[in-house]
Image (cartoon, rainbow, N blue to C red):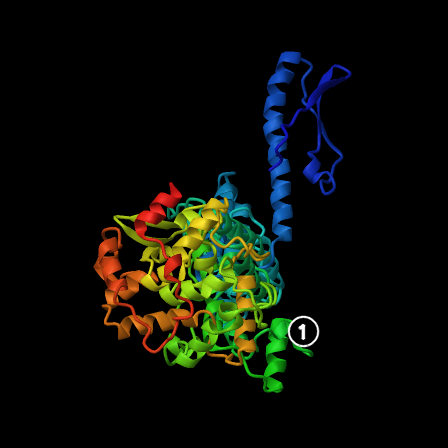
């Protein structure tokens, strides 16, 4: 709709008043006239004012109909008609034929006209029944009527020329023709056959193109509190657009299970980072998958396939909630993965942990920048020193650690703890269950963590680790992940089953070996409680109980004695005094 009001003007030609109005800017290039000019057929000015108000409504309806016509022309054609759409077309055409017949009979037919009408009815019933019985769908008359009825305002559908629905559409026209002929014959026999009410405008699935909705989806998810980071938004957008590109851009309700299956099949053949592989990088996704299979390239993992399918499934769930979309074609479409999460990422072995915490970072390095080379500096005032230690004694993800603020290290009831939350600017968590309080382990205190937190606060830092700024993808952990991977490579312990996330598995194993109950392990790691227990209450254990369980945590055989500095440890009271 055009947002600007329509303002015609009156002018006179001789004694007669005329209407002249401009064409709205949004349709000036396509409207068949340069202006709407016509006679109001009156010489009386007051009557002209009355008639021009009626004319304004009529002209605006012409403009709106022109816009609807343009919109129909720009819409992609339907690949198939649904059974409901076919039945609606049949009912509309049947109504049209009976309404036309009723108008004719209201003109009081004479004998000659009645005889001619009866012959036409008999011919229509005979020919229509013959064609319908033998499946002879294609005739010039049926084809032209079918094409015309699609344009009627009560139908308003655009069907692809190659659609397999055309024979069914012709049959719907023939069925309506035979039904109407039978009803007309009964009228000619003197039986009262009423014309049914005109069928309502065909209720179609919302015609929003998938491509136009993706941007709306991403924008909504990104601007919500605790919403998507730029990296998450980019990944969801990229793969959803790849699906739409592969399946073709169509109205959101037109996709089916076959489209989703074809996408999944392509994913199962695509190698990871296929856009960077020579020979595949310039190919469309479907062709790249086919070529990768021919080259026998190793495909991406089942976990990553499911992750991508999850992106597109999430888009359809959003579309169902916001638009008239009948079903999600990605429901139930996953790759079965054998094994457990442990099979994808291992905990650190004792030798690997020893290598990490006896690396130059903890025994002396050249500088913060060259922290993998031996030297005299121990960067205990820097994130490269503390992030692995916090990971070891909390099981937190790297992103959760690096986004911590100085105010997130707290004291309550004499218990020092770390609050993992998304309640603040630029903070995000994997899910709502990730919010938690983790008591600071005594070893972290003895290494000097509370003193480090107090120092950062006194220096005016809002973030605990300001040396790791947010990356362009919107996450704090991206740059650090590369640093930690380089550390593992420099120590010659790197393999594809370990990463920073291995600290999470290592912490879980240590909790189990320290006889910490599973419920408390889940609470410390931020795993949501299942069932009724997870639906009621705050879902948080009392800090005192958590501290008691954290006090049991031991890393048997791991020697961290070279890091322990009792003089660096702060008591809870000293920490409170330092921060006040």
Q: Closest to the observer: 106 or 133?
A: 133
Q: Closest to the observer: 286 or 62?
A: 286
Residue 136 placement: quadrant? bottom right
The residue lying at 24 percent from left, 64 percent from top is 519
Residue 553 placement: quadrant? bottom left
Q: Closest to the observer: 538 or 470?
A: 470
Furthest toward the front, the residue is: 567
Tell me if residue 181 comes above or below residue 30 in the rendering: below
Tell me if residue 414 comes above or below residue 368 in the rendering: above
Residue 163 drawn at (x, y percent) = 57, 66
Q: Quadrant of the N terminus?
A: top right
Q: Quadrant of the C terminus?
A: top left
Q: Is residue 189 visible?
A: no
Residue 306 drawn at (x, y percent) = 45, 71
Q: Is residue 531 visible?
A: yes
Q: Closest to the observer: 504 or 433?
A: 504
Residue 391 placement: quadrant? bottom left
Q: Badge 1: few (under 14), some or many (20 or more) residues near its Cα, within 10 Å?
A: few
The residue lying at 52 percent from left, 75 percent from top is 488
Q: Secondary structure at mark 1?
A: loop
Q: Which residue is mark 1?
A: 281
């Amino acid at each position: 709709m055009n947002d600007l009001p329509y303002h015609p003007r009156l002018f006179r030609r001789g004694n007669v008043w005329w209407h002249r109005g401009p064409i709205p800017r949004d349709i000036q290039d396509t409207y068949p006239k340069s202006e709407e000019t016509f006679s109001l057929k009156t010489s009386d000015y007051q009557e002209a004012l009355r008639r021009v108000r009626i004319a304004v409504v009529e002209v605006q309806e012409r403009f709106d109909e022109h816009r609807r016509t343009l919109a129909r022309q720009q819409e992609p054609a339907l690949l198939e008609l649904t059974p409901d759409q076919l039945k609606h077309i049949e009912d509309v055409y049947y109504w049209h034929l009976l309404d036309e017949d009723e108008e004719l009979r209201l003109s009081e037919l004479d004998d000659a006209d009645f005889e001619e009408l009866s012959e036409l009815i008999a011919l229509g019933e005979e020919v229509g029944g013959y064609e319908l019985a033998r499946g002879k769908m294609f005739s010039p008359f049926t084809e032209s009527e079918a094409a015309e009825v699609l344009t009627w305002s009560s139908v308003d559908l655009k069907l692809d020329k190659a659609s397999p629905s055309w024979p069914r559409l012709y049959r719907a026209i023939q069925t309506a023709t035979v039904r109407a002929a039978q009803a007309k014959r009964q009228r000619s026999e003197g039986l009262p056959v009423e014309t049914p009410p005109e069928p309502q405008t065909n209720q179609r699935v919302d015609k929003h193109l998938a491509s136009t909705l993706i941007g709306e989806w991403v924008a909504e998810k990104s601007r919500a509190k605790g919403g998507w980071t730029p990296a998450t938004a980019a990944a969801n957008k990229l793969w959803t657009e790849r699906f739409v590109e592969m399946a073709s851009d169509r109205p959101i309700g037109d996709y089916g299970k076959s489209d989703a299956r074809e996408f999944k099949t392509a994913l199962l053949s695509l190698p990871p980072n296929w856009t960077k592989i020579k020979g595949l990088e310039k190919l469309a996704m479907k062709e790249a998958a086919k070529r990768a299979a021919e080259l026998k390239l190793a495909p991406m993992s089942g976990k990553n396939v499911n992750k991508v399918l999850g992106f597109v499934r999430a888009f359809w769930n959003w579309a169902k909630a916001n638009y008239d979309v009948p079903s999600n074609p990605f429901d139930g479409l996953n790759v079965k993965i054998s094994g457990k999460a442990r099979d994808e990422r291992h905990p650190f072995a004792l030798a690997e942990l020893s290598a990490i915490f006896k690396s130059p970072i903890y025994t002396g390095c050249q500088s913060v920048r060259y922290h993998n080379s031996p030297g005299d500096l121990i960067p205990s005032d820097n994130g490269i020193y503390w992030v692995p230690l916090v990971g070891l004694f909390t099981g937190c993800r790297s992103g959760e650690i690096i986004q911590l603020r100085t105010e997130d290290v707290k004291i309550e009831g004499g218990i020092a703890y770390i609050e993992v939350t998304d309640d603040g600017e630029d903070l995000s968590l994997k899910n709502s269950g990730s919010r938690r309080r983790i008591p600071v382990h005594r070893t972290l205190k003895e290494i000097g963590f509370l003193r480090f937190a107090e120092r950062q606060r006194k220096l005016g830092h809002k973030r605990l680790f300001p040396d790791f700024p947010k990356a362009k993808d919107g996450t704090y952990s991206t740059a650090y992940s590369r640093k930690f991977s380089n550390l593992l490579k420099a120590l010659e312990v790197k393999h594809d089953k370990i990463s920073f996330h291995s600290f999470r598995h290592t912490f879980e194993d240590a909790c189990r070996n320290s006889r910490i109950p599973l419920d408390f392990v889940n609470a410390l790691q931020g795993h949501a409680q299942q069932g009724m227990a997870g639906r009621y209450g705050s879902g948080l254990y009392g800090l005192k109980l958590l501290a008691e369980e954290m006090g049991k945590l031991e890393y048997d055989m791991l020697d961290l004695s070279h890091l322990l500095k009792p003089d660096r440890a702060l008591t809870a009271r000293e920490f409170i005094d330092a921060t006040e």
